[in-house]
Amino acid sequence: MDSFNTALNCGAFLLPWNAVMLALGILTAVIVTEILVKKRGMYKDLALDVCIVGIPCGIVGGRLFAALSGKVAFASIFDITRTGMNLPGALLFAAIGILIYLRVKKTDRGAALDVLMPGAFFGLAVGRWSDFFLCDGLGPVAGSGVPKFFPLVTFTNAYFADRQTVAYAVFFLDFLICLALGVTALILLKKKLQPGKTARITIVLYLFAAFIVEWLRDGEARQIVFGELRFNQIVWFAELLLAIVLLFVFGKHKAAGADENSAADAPEIGHETGEEPEAESGESEA
């Protein structure tokens, strides 16, 4: 198993494949965002600054929620030699950090989030392949009589001992969902919707899909804590409700306020200019 996840082994230096895929995911997000930022003439260092803020926040959130779920001991939260991350916690803290940064920077949050979405989802799609090398993010073990070919099934930790135990590759479904949402975000950006609407649509779709897909996972990722609900599902559902409130309700209030302000600022015909409204052609001829 260790050799399967090893990309480079130079004595004391060991580079695992899952770390490579995570790094490639971040790089993908930065490159895509840089291209979109340049095309739209936005703040040129937006992608880099978001990474500087979002990655540390994501690590803290991922480790904290991993401890809350029981995957990591609280005493080992900041022990980087121990593995264990929680994706919903990492994304939640990264999002909070990015929103605070955009507010401090006084950047249009709606427009900035819209531009960040395609890169974020493409980056997540690439990063999901880290689960392939960790043999994580899997569904139930594939039984006899089931077609056993990749990407329907993939390796489990037990496979490297018995050479036969494989499980359904749920992480590959995650990959397809993120890829589809990245394309969807690009299409919505081209439609020039109200600022923030692309982010609202794609974020809610992702959180809903993540909540459903969690039911397909098995093994350690299940962590059933309430009936048939798992820890991650509860977190995904809470984030979904939060996204609906913050992105839809507050977004609508902001849009309504903008419309009222624009209507109030519009000059009344014939008053600010001091001119009388033009008479209709029939009256002027008379």
Image: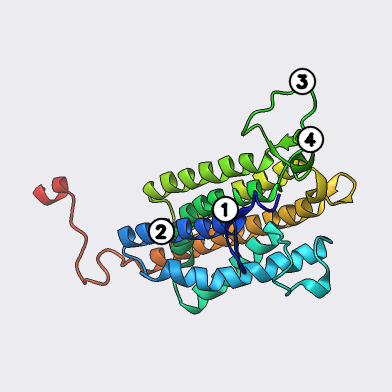
Instruction: Determine which residue is flagged by label 2.
Output: 31
Which amino acid type is marked by label 1? Answer: Gly
Looking at the image, which residue is at 42% across and 47% down? 186
Q: Which numbered mark, 1 or 4, is in the foreground of this view?
A: 4
> Which numbered disc covers residue 141?
4
Q: Nearer the viewer, residue 163 or 61?
A: 163
Which amino acid type is marked by label 2? Answer: Ile
The reply to whether dot 4 and dot 3 touch (C-beta < 8 Å) is no
Q: Is residue 81 left or right of residue 248?
A: right
Task: Residue 27: give x, y in percent of width and height.
Answer: 47, 60
How far, Cα to Cα, is label 2 from label 1? 14 Å
Instruction: Determine which residue is flagged by label 1.
Output: 127
How far, Cα to Cα, is label 4 from label 3? 12 Å
Q: Which numbered mark, 3 or 1, is in the foreground of this view?
A: 3
Q: Nearer the viewer, residue 265 or 44?
A: 44
Looking at the image, which residue is at 82% across and 72% down? 74
Q: Secondary structure at mark 2?
A: helix
How far, Cα to Cα, is label 3 from label 1? 31 Å
Q: Secondary structure at mark 1?
A: helix
Are there few (<14), some (14-19), or many (20+) residues within 10 Å of tag 4?
A: some
